[in-house]
C-alpha cells in the first residue's frame, strides 16, 4: 500500500524532517527580524507569526489525516519513545506552563515553585506506577482500562465523567490563553479572539485524530521551547554577560534581594513559606505541599497525558518515553524561575521610578481597555487608561512607584521581551510559542474528550456494531461541538488560567488516581471497590470545589472557625484549614483510597480470572488475558 | 515474545519490580517533599548566588526526577531481560 510505504519512510526520516523544520523556523524568525529592521509595522509581524505557525500546524494535520481507527485513536502505536516524549511535552505544557507559570513565580517567588515541582515530580509516578502497564493493556482510552479492570460499564462511565470534567475545565483555560495572545497580537477583542484560536485547534485535531495531533505536537514543542529559551538567554547575556540563564540567574536573585530592601518589599523573592511581612507562616507551607500533592498525583491521572503512552510501539518504549517526556518538560521548567527572576529585575531596575510621562509604549498596548493586563496607576484618572488600576490610588507625583505599577501574572511572559526592550520579533516569537503551548494542549484535551464520548460511550455502550466510518465521523463531530462549547465558556467567563488548570488536576487526581494505581498494584481489589473509589473521590472533590468557590459564607456558617473567607475572583471563597481551594484534591485523593479500601474490606474481591488479567498486564510479553466482552476491535 | 512465566517466576518477577517501585517512591518522597520542608534552613547556604533551598525547588529536585525516570526505565529493562520478558 502506498500509504503504508509513505508512512514508514516518514517514520524512518523523523530526525531529518524535524531538523529541516527547525532550520526553516529559525530562518523564518530571522526573516521577520529583517522585516522589522526594514520598518514593517509590528502589527503585520504579529499577523505573520500567528497565521504562519497555525498554517504549518494545519498543514501537518492535513498531511496526517487518516481513516483508520488505530491511527485515529493511538497513532497506529508507532511513535518512537523520543518523539512521543516531545509530543507529550507539548501536550503537557499548556498556556498555564508557558504563560502562567513564570507569572506566578514573579509574584510568588519561592511559593510559585510548587508549580514547578508539582508539574515535574508527577512523572516519576507515571513512570513507576502507570505508563508501562497501561501500554501493555493496550486498547484506546483510560476509561477502557477502568471498564476492563472494574467489570464494565459502571466503572467506564464514571471514568468518562471524571475525564470530561477535568479535561473540559482544562481546555477552557487553554482557550483563555489563546484568546489573550490573539487579542494582543491580532488586535481583536478577547471574545472573537477565543473563536479565532478555536479554528487553529480544530484543523489540527479533527482530520487525523491522535496521529495528526502527535506530529503537530512535536512541531509545536520545537517552537515553544525555542520561544521560551531565546528571550531568557538574551536577557541573561545582557544582565550577566553569560547566555546560560539557568546557571546565571543566581546573580539576578541577589540583585533582586538588594532592590527589595531599597524598595521596601518585606516578602523576599527567595524566602520559603513566608507571609506578606516576611515572617515564617505555617499556612503558606501547608498550601505549598498540598498544591504539590494535587499537581503530582493529578499528573499521573490526567487521561490526555496517560493516553500518549498508548501510542508507543512497546512497553519498553513507553517507559523510556516517560523519561524523554520529563526531560523535554524539564527544559522549560528549570528555565521558568530564571525567566521570572530576569523579568522582575528588569521591572525593579528600569520600570519602577521612571517618569509616567515617558513610559514605553508597551505599557499602553498591554494596559488598554479590552486587554487590561498592565496598569500604571500614578495619576488620579489612571483608571480611564488602565482598567487594571481599579482600586489603586496613585500619589500623582508623575513617578511610577512599585505600588502604582500593576501587571497581571498572565502578562509576564508575553510582555517581558517588550519590557526588556528586545526587538518586537522576540515578542512575536514568544507569542507564537505561547500559542503553540495552548493549542497543543487543547488538541490533546479535546481529543481525549471526543474519544471518551465516541469510543467509550457511543461505541462501547450504545452501538457496539457501529462501523469504523461512523465511529470516526461521530468522534469528529463531537470534537468540534465540545470545542465550540469550550470557546464559548472561555469567551464569556474570561477567567484566569492557573486556577482552572489546578482544579483540573485536583479533579483528575481525586477521581482516577486511586482506581488506576490500585487497579494495577492491588490484585485483590474487586469491581465495586473501584467503582466506589472513583465515585467517592470525584464526589468529595467536586463537593468541596463547588461549596468553597460558590457557597463560601454558607460553608463558614456550617464549619465555623475551620473556614476562612478570602476574596478572590470577585467571590467570597472558603479556605478550609487555610487551604486554597485550587488544592481541593487534598480531600478527594485520600477519600478515594479510603473508599476503595473499605470496599475491599467489605468483600469486594477480584475474581481469579480478573487476577489473571492483572498478572498479564504486569509483564511486558504475552497476551493480555482480557475478560470476555472487554475486547475492543480495531 | 510470548514466553509465559510460571507462577513462581511471576512472583519473583513482581517482587523485584515492586521493590524497584518502592525504592523510587521513597526517593520521590524525599526529593519531592522532605528536602523542601527544610527550605528555610537551606536558604542560609548560598551557591553562585542561589540560596540552596530555592535552588533545590527550582532545579535540584527536577534534575533528580529526570534521572529517576531514566533510571527506572533502565533498571526495569534489566529485570525484564533477566526474566526473558522484554518486549523488544
Image (cartoon, rainbow, N blue to C red):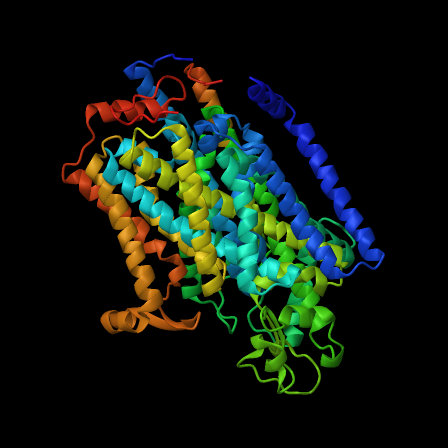
User: Taking A387 as reference, is A450 above or below it?
Assistant: above
Query: Which is more toward the observer, B21 or A466?
Result: A466
Count of number-bearing discs: 0
Q: Residue A3's spot in the image, x, y percent?
A: 57, 22
Q: Residue A266's spot in the image, x, y percent?
A: 56, 73
Q: Is residue B29 left or right of residue A414?
A: left
Residue at the (36%, 25%) spot, across then down: A633
Q: Is residue A449 left or right of residue A190?
A: left
User: Taking A230 as reference, is A126 above or below it?
Assistant: above
Q: Quadrant of the N terminus of chain A?
A: top right
Q: Residue A590's spot in the image, x, y percent?
A: 29, 49
Q: Is residue A248 visible?
A: no
Query: Which is more toward the observer, A63 or A586?
Result: A63
User: Taking B73 as reference, is A277 above or below it?
Assistant: below
Q: Is residue A507 visible?
A: yes
Q: Residue A214's spot in the image, x, y percent?
A: 54, 36
Query: Which is more toward the observer, A578 or A547?
Result: A547
Outermost residue on the left side: it is A602
Quarter of image, res A357: bottom right
Residue at the (41%, 16%) spot, across then down: B83
Residue at the (58%, 85%) spot, across then down: A393
Q: Quadrant of the C terminus of chain A?
A: top left
Residue at the (47%, 67%) spot, across then down: A280
Amino acid at each position: 500500500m502506498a500509504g503504508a510505504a509513505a508512512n514508514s519512510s516518514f517514520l524512518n526520516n523523523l530526525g531529518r524532517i524535524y531538523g529541516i523544520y527547525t532550520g526553516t523556523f529559525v530562518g523564518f524568525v530571522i526573516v521577520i527580524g529583517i522585516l522589522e529592521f526594514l520598518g514593517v509595522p509590528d502589527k503585520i509581524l504579529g499577523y505573520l507569526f500567528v497565521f504562519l505557525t497555525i498554517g504549518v500546524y494545519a498543514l501537518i494535520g492535513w498531511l496526517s489525516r487518516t481513516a483508520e481507527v488505530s491511527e485515529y485513536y493511538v497513532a497506529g502505536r508507532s511513535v518512537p519513545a523520543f518523539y512521543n516524549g516531545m509530543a507529550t511535552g507539548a501536550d503537557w505544557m499548556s498556556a498555564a506552563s508557558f504563560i502562567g507559570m513564570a507569572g506566578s513565580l514573579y509574584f510568588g517567588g519561592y511559593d510559585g515553585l510548587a508549580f514547578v515541582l508539582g508539574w515535574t515530580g508527577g512523572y516519576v509516578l507515571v513512570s513507576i506506577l502507570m505508563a508501562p502497564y497501561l501500554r501493555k493493556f493496550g486498547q484506546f482510552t483510560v476509561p477502557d482500562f477502568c471498564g476492563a479492570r472494574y467489570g464494565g460499564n459502571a466503572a467506564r462511565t464514571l471514568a468518562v465523567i471524571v475525564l470530561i470534567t477535568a479535561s473540559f475545565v482544562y481546555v477552557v483555560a487553554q482557550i483563555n490563553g489563546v484568546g489573550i495572545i490573539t487579542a494582543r497580537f491580532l488586535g481583536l477583542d478577547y471574545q472573537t479572539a477565543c473563536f479565532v484560536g478555536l479554528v487553529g485547534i480544530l484543523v489540527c485535531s479533527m482530520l487525523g485524530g491522535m496521529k495528526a495531533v502527535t506530529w503537530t505536537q512535536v512541531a509545536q514543542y520545537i517552537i515553544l521551547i525555542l520561544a521560551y529559551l531565546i528571550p531568557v538567554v538574551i536577557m541573561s547575556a545582557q544582565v550577566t554577560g553569560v547566555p546560560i540563564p539557568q546557571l546565571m540567574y543566581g546573580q539576578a536573585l541577589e540583585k533582586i534581594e538588594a532592590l527589595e530592601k531599597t524598595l521596601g518589599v518585606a516578602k523576599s523573592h527567595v524566602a520559603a513559606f513566608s507571609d506578606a511581612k516576611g515572617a515564617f507562616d505555617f499556612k503558606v507551607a501547608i498550601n505549598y505541599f498540598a498544591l504539590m500533592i494535587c499537581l503530582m498525583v493529578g499528573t499521573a491521572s490526567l487521561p490526555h497525558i496517560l493516553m500518549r503512552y498508548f501510542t508507543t510501539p512497546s512497553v519498553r518504549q513507553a517507559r523510556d518515553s516517560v523519561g524523554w517526556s520529563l526531560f523535554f518538560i524539564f527544559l522549560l521548567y528549570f528555565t521558568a524561575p530564571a525567566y521570572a527572576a530576569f523579568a522582575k529585575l528588569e521591572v525593579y531596575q528600569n520600570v519602577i521610578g521612571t517618569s509616567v510621562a515617558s513610559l514605553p509604549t508597551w505599557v499602553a498596548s498591554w494596559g488598554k481597555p479590552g486587554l487590561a493586563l498592565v496598569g500604571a496607576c500614578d495619576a488620579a484618572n489612571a483608571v480611564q487608561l488602565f482598567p487594571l488600576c481599579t482600586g489603586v490610588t496613585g500619589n500623582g507625583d508623575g513617578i511610577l512607584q512599585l505600588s502604582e505599577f500593576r501587571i497581571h501574572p498572565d502578562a509576564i511572559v508575553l510582555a517581558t521581551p517588550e519590557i526588556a526592550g528586545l526587538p518586537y520579533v522576540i515578542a512575536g516569537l514568544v507569542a507564537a510559542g505561547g500559542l503553540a503551548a495552548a493549542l497543543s494542549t487543547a488538541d490533546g484535551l479535546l481529543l481525549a474528550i471526543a474519544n471518551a464520548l465516541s469510543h467509550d460511550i457511543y461505541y462501547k455502550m450504545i452501538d457496539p456494531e457501529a462501523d469504523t466510518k461512523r465511529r470516526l465521523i461521530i468522534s469528529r463531530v463531537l470534537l468540534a461541538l465540545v470545542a465550540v462549547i469550550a470557546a464559548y465558556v472561555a469567551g464569556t467567563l474570561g477567567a484566569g488560567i492557573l486556577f482552572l488548570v489546578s482544579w483540573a488536576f485536583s479533579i483528575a487526581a481525586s477521581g482516577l488516581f486511586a482506581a488506576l494505581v490500585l487497579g494495577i498494584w492491588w490484585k485483590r481489589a474487586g469491581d465495586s471497590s473501584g467503582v466506589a473509589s472513583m465515585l467517592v473521590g470525584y464526589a468529595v472533590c467536586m463537593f468541596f470545589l463547588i461549596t468553597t468557590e460558590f457557597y463560601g459564607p454558607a460553608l463558614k456558617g456550617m464549619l465555623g472557625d475551620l473556614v476562612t473567607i478570602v476574596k478572590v475572583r470577585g467571590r467570597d471563597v472558603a479556605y478550609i484549614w487555610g487551604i486554597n481551594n485550587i488544592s481541593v484534591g487534598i480531600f478527594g485523593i485520600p477519600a478515594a483510597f479510603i473508599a476503595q479500601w473499605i470496599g475491599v474490606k467489605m468483600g469486594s474481591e477480584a475474581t481469579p480470572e480478573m487476577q489473571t488479567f492483572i498478572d498479564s498486564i504486569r509483564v511486558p510479553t504475552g497476551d493480555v488475558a482480557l475478560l470476555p466482552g472487554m475486547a475492543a476491535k480495531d | 515474545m510470548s514466553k509465559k512465566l510460571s507462577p513462581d517466576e511471576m512472583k519473583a518477577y513482581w517482587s523485584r519490580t515492586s521493590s524497584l517501585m518502592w525504592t523510587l517512591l521513597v526517593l520521590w518522597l524525599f526529593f519531592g517533599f522532605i528536602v523542601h520542608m527544610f527550605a528555610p534552613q537551606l536558604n542560609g547556604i548560598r551557591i553562585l548566588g542561589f540560596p540552596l533551598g530555592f535552588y533545590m525547588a527550582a532545579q535540584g529536585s527536577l534534575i533528580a526526577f529526570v534521572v529517576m525516570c531514566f533510571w527506572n526505565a533502565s533498571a526495569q529493562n534489566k529485570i525484564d531481560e533477566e526474566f526473558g520478558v522484554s518486549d523488544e
